[in-house]
Image (cartoon, rainbow, N blue to C red):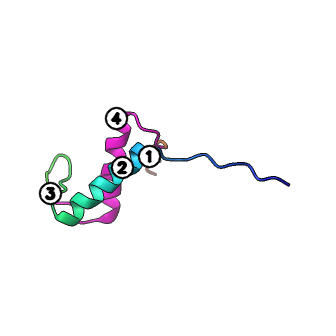
């Protein structure tokens, strides 16, 4: 039985935004939104990158709703 080809969940543009955010985090220059505090969390850096990608209209799955 032939397997179905998987489509990309995230676009290349989204991946670029996330990698840019990760590099900024490692350099210590990534800041969070309203408070402007330095981001040290890997997960937070990824979230910032994906958020920026969404703003630019890149293909990114919708955010999960918090419980």
* Left or right relative to 51: residue 66: right
Which one is in front in this view, the residue at disc 3 or the one at disc 4? 4
Q: Earlier in the sequence, mark 4 or mark 2?
A: 2
The circle on residue 12 is 1
The residue to which callout 4 is attached is: 56
Q: In terms of secondary structure, where does tag 3 sit?
A: loop
* Left or right relative to 61: residue 34: left
Q: Earlier in the sequence, mark 2 or mark 3?
A: 2
Where residue 2 appears, as percent x and y from the top left, is 81, 52
Q: Quadrant of residue 28?
A: bottom left
Q: Which residues, given as a range, are shown in magenta?
A: 38-60
Residue count near mark 4 (Cα–Cα under 10 Å), binned few <14, some 14–19, many ≥20 = few
Q: In the image, what residue occupies the spot 35% across and 53% down? A: 18
The residue to which callout 2 is attached is: 16
Disc 1/disc 2 C-alpha distance (Å): 6 Å
Q: Earlier in the sequence, mark 4 or mark 1?
A: 1
Q: Are marks 1 and 2 in contact (CB under 8 Å)?
A: yes
The residue to which callout 3 is attached is: 37
Q: Quadrant of residue 40?
A: bottom left
Q: In the image, what residue occupies the spot 46% across and 43% down? A: 60
């Amino acid at each position: 039985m032939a397997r179905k080809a998987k489509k990309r969940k995230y676009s290349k543009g989204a991946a670029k935004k996330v990698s840019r955010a990760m590099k900024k985090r490692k350099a210590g220059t990534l800041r969070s939104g309203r408070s402007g505090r330095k981001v040290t969390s890997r997960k937070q850096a990824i979230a910032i990158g994906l958020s920026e990608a969404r703003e630019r209209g890149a293909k990114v799955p919708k955010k999960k709703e918090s419980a």
